[in-house]
Amino acid sequence: MTTEDTSSSLRPALPRADHVGSLLRPQAIAGARMQGLKGAELCAVEDREIAALVAMQKEAGLRVFTDGEARRQFWHYDFMGMLTGLDMKPSTRSLPFQTKHKTPPIEAHLTGPLDFPADHPMLRHFTYVRDLVAPGEGIAKISIPGPSACHYRMVPENIEHKPYLDQELMFHDIAATYRKAVQAFYEAGCRYLQLDDIFFAYLGDEKQREERRAMGQDPDELVRKYAWMLEEAIKDRPADMVIGMHMCRGNFRSSHVAEGGYHGAADAIFNTTSVDIYLMEYDTERAGGLEPLASLPKGRKRVMPGFITTKTGKLESLDWIRAKYDEASKYVDIDQLGVAPQCGFASTEHGNEITEDDQKRKLELVVKTAEAIWGES
């Protein structure tokens, strides 16, 4: 049964050209942090550089604008660590990316009842970008980790708040926390909120599934629970708020963690959630085939299949991209498709192995593709 929203006609028009959100960190921000700048001094540097990032997105022809996650170290840990009851602590482990480089060794710990604080710093991160977008220029978006991140990134031994050993209670409180977050961002003026729920894609990887089984978790049940949490968080949003979700298999210095298709998650994400826009990784064979797109219900929902990679600077040809959309249109109406890169350009502050010029050319290609295929961006 689909949850296609009867009030969806009240929501803003969905973009045809989009991007996942993170951008290469400006050198001035990296330098300021290396110098030890904090507080207002660091914020002043970040504000100046984020204004330049927004200007770059405008120059590329986009109509969806983010802060590039330029204030963050990680795409998810910063947001999570700013929640009440969840703390990031030093660890002896790094995330298992397919690279010689190691992610900073920190892990999430549940230390008390989860909640979304009224002064969560990312509300201000959003409003700063919001104020840089003039009427008629497009829409400001913020990308935050989806509810699944708070569970998937929580190893059992880090659950210090003992009531959350009851997984059902933990799922309930994560959903309630995100429901508050959705409302808070709306009240801050956000009309396009993106939830990075990448672990739906991770659970298509047999190695990841086996790791979950070793923790006593059923990977298929996790897909259902994650979809439930997502829908609980967004189902009561106001009618003029667009929700996007992004899925990938890891993104750190142009490397990945997981592989496998969307077959096991397609029905849950497409038909049991009221998400409007799906930004899906599709730049390599690791993502599997396009057949799962056939599960998308007819209507307003839109998929942005990420044929354009952010992991290398090599620019895809427009003819090649057109051929990929011809293939995708065998499974879903072409009007329910859009275009975005497969992931962000810098899911951590380290960034992918590309240049700022590469990044801008990729964003320009996104816009060029939308105009070539649909005559709009």
Image (cartoon, rainbow, N blue to C red):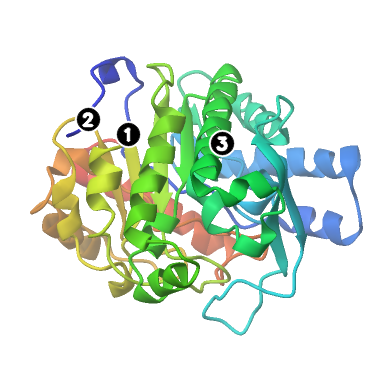
Q: Badge 2 is on which residue?
A: 300
* Label at residue 173: 3
The residue that appears at 19% across and 56% down in the rendered structure is 292
The span from disc 3 to disc 1 (Cα, nearest Å) is: 24 Å
Give the x, y percent position of residue 116: 65, 31
Q: Judging from the image, what secondary structure is the residue with disc 2 in?
A: loop
The residue that appears at 48% across and 33% down in the rendered structure is 193
Location of residue 219 with respect to 58 vertically, above or below? below
Q: Quadrant of residue 282?
A: bottom left
**Relative horizontal placement of residue 33, taking residue 257 as reference (left or right):** right
Q: Judging from the image, what secondary structure is the residue with disc 3 in?
A: helix
Q: Badge 1 is on which residue?
A: 276
The residue that appears at 61% across and 20% down in the rendered structure is 188
Q: Judging from the image, what secondary structure is the residue with disc 1 in?
A: loop
Give the x, y percent position of residue 356: 58, 60
Q: Tell which circle, 2 or 3, labels the residue nearer the N-terminal end.
A: 3
Location of residue 22 with respect to 12 vertically, above or below? below
Q: Is residue 82 visible?
A: no
**Relative horizontal placement of residue 116, taking residue 278 as reference (left or right):** right
